[in-house]
Image: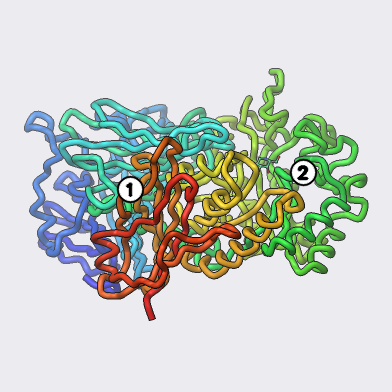
Amino acid sequence: MNANQPIINLKTFTTFALALGLSCTAWAQNITIPVETKNNALVLQIDGKKDIGTIYLGKKLNDAAAYAQIPSVYKQTADYTDNTSNSAYSTSGSRGYFEPAVTVTHSDGNNSLDLRYVSHKVTKVDNNVSLLSVVLKDPVYNFEVTLYYKSYFNEDVVEQWSSIKHSEKGNVVLHKFASANLYLKAAKYYLTQYHGEWAKEMQPEESLITHGIKTLDTKLGTRANLFQPSVFMISIDQPATEDEGTVLYGSVEWSGNFRTDLELDNMDNLRVIAGANNYASAYTLKPNEVFTTPAFLYTMSDKGKGDASRKLQRWARNYRVLDGNGNRLTLLNNWEATYFDFDEQKLFELIKDTKKLGVDMFLLDDGWFANKYPRNGDNAGLGDWQENKKKLPNGVSSLVKEATANGVKFGIWLEPEMVNPKSELYEKHPNWVIKQPKRDEHYFRNQLVLDLANPEVQNFVFGIVDDLFTKNPELAYIKWDCNAVIFNAYSAHLKNQSHFYIEYMRGLYKVLERIRAKYPKVPMMLCSGGGGRVDYAALKYFTEFWPSDNTDPLERIFIQWEYSYFYPAITSSNHVTDWGKQPIKFRVDVAMMGKLGFDIVVSKLSGDELKFCQEAIKNYNQLKDIIWHGEQYRLADPRKNSVASIMYVDEAKSSCVMFNYLVNNRYDEGSKLPVKLKGLDAAKRYTLKEINLYPGSNSSLDATKTYSGEFLMTIGYNPDVKAGRNSVILQINEAK
Ligand code: DGJ
């Protein structure tokens, strides 16, 4: 199948042949529906009882007709044939006995649900994207679920979600409402999951999945990924490596509470049930109201983790991240340079330093606002978004003017979802704050979360951004922070508190939609006290994210490495700071792996340090197109080697950049063996030139030699990383 053919090959192997794009309500014994992408297929099958199950998820077959021959391997023995263990959307209270995707209490108080196939149709969105929808109904109740499968052919990515509605006489309560219910059949499954903390994001763990249920979830409401992000990998049969093995990457597209259950059943099938977390969230659904779940996103590769990553990164750039194929601004941020201690004069100096350094923009961080309770620390002022008159007597507009006069852009920090109890906002609108009416307040970083379920609060939050842009049309960038989790979840606005977590997120997305409708392209950084909110629902509105407050470059190599499995380099804001013990070259070289920024006191740099940074920024400007838009290949894993290596290759395979870092400072460690490059054209010849040399130092590598792509990918190249040369960047170009 080529890229111009439909993504979803719809075939039935019954007496009825269905035409692509037509809706179908008739069938004989079985209907087989393959959802095919370039390399993979998810195959659904409807049996004579109208049960819909997953009979296959994996590498696609050349002959789509052969899917019908797949035995119902997921079915149990004769005694159990009626069960629905491979259900495409498992229910509870009727015939299913495993973890359900959906659980309800009907309007008459009955707790059973049984969903049977009614019809399906395929809509071709464009040459690459198709949408399969499958309607299921309960034979007894007027209760209906539509399953959606949006497939991106070239990227091998599928987004799955469901919509739920009913026309019963009264309300129905949804106790669980998963986005997707995948089904895998293999001998063994290995889970790679992540845990973390502030400054310790994306710590990987891999384990054999054992029988029973393993749940990955969060209940924090906001800053939801603080302890656990929703991204995970499942390797099939054996742990996948960078270039070998079958692996599925999954993630829930939801910035709030998520939940993924991985259930290994009695027949060794793995059921993956993922969606928004139903924790404290029983949802009362009125007749004819449609409840749409967020999407569950996945991709699969039989060529290892690297291939899976590149597919997801391509999908993200092409379809999800705001301006994913566009440009980004390099910047100087003042957070670690000043913290809350600055005034207009100091900022004017920093704006001049921005120009001197050679980056595109100055980003003013926390501390610029609030008067009655000035924001001079993290214990006051959040919510009062008026310029602090002492620090900024002439307002933000004077800073924007100064930036423009210096030929740089100006960006600003906001944390619009939050409030300090010590603020005028809290005094004026205590009912806008999430807190339990009868309980003591409980703070996270001295602050509370505003109730975005309330439309008045949504207007307020939209207004913060809108006012800033209205007063300062030249404002070029926003860093949107979110430092607190939700304690004492309670909305004074909502009648039904069980809707709180869902309505909060709906409110947040409404605000972001409004911002994007009015300011479609202004770059915004997604920050949450570090990487507390990094997900593919939010990245629809944001151009980049802040991986971690931990900017120690040695730590960052590991953190950025793990994010790179799931997110493209263009989204990773990497700032050079004073964290860690490494010299400036090492810090800059590490930050260059993604979207480069600085958060240092430029005036304290020595002459050579400044010169190095200025040259490095020039190099970055030449290479950024490859880093942002090229293909990324992980070459040497810092968790398995003393050296970490990663490279980026442009579409023509003629311009590349390779980053190499020493990650083990023990005696005599370094790149003893050549590192095998990837993604090159075997037939082309390349030169390798070391760049970002510190003033006064020479490269130990010979830039005049040329090598074939075949040589570099088979034999490799030694970047000569060792103590004293602990970071080496190579610019690789096709030899002229
Ligand atoms: C947390 C962020 O992660 C930091 O980068 C900084 O913006 C502070 N908040 C400001 O309070």
Indicate the quadrant containing the C terminus: top left, top right, bottom left or bottom right: bottom left
Q: Is mark 2 within 8 Å of ligand 1?
A: no
Coloration mode: rainbow
* Earlier sequence position, callout 2 versus callout 1: 2
Task: Name the quadrant where ligand 1 sits.
Answer: top right
Amino acid bearing label 2: Thr
Residue behind mark 2: 338
Q: Is mark 1 within 8 Å of ligand 1?
A: no
Residue occupying image coordinates x 47% and y 67%: 626
Q: Is residue 139 above or below residue 67?
A: above
Residue occupying image coordinates x 20% and y 66%: 18
Residue occupying image coordinates x 70% and y 38%: 418
- Dividing the picture into quadrants, the one containing residue 188 is top left
Residue occupying image coordinates x 16% and y 60%: 12
Cα separation between marks 2 and 1: 42 Å
User: In the image as oriented, which residue stretches furthest toward the bottom?
Assistant: 736
Amino acid bearing label 1: Lys
Q: Position of residue 352 (x, y in %)?
A: 79, 61
- Indicate left or right for 655 with 545 as reference: left
Q: Position of residue 485 (x, y in %)?
A: 61, 32
- Dividing the picture into quadrants, the one containing residue 694 is bottom right
- Indicate left or right for 357 with 622 as reference: right
- Residue 543 visible? The answer is no
Q: Position of residue 152 (x, y in %)?
A: 35, 62
- Indicate left or right for 686 with 561 as reference: left
Indicate the quadrant containing the N terminus: top left, top right, bottom left or bottom right: bottom left
Between label 2 and label 1, give the one nearer the viewer: 1
Residue behind mark 1: 672
**Residue 1: which disc?**
none
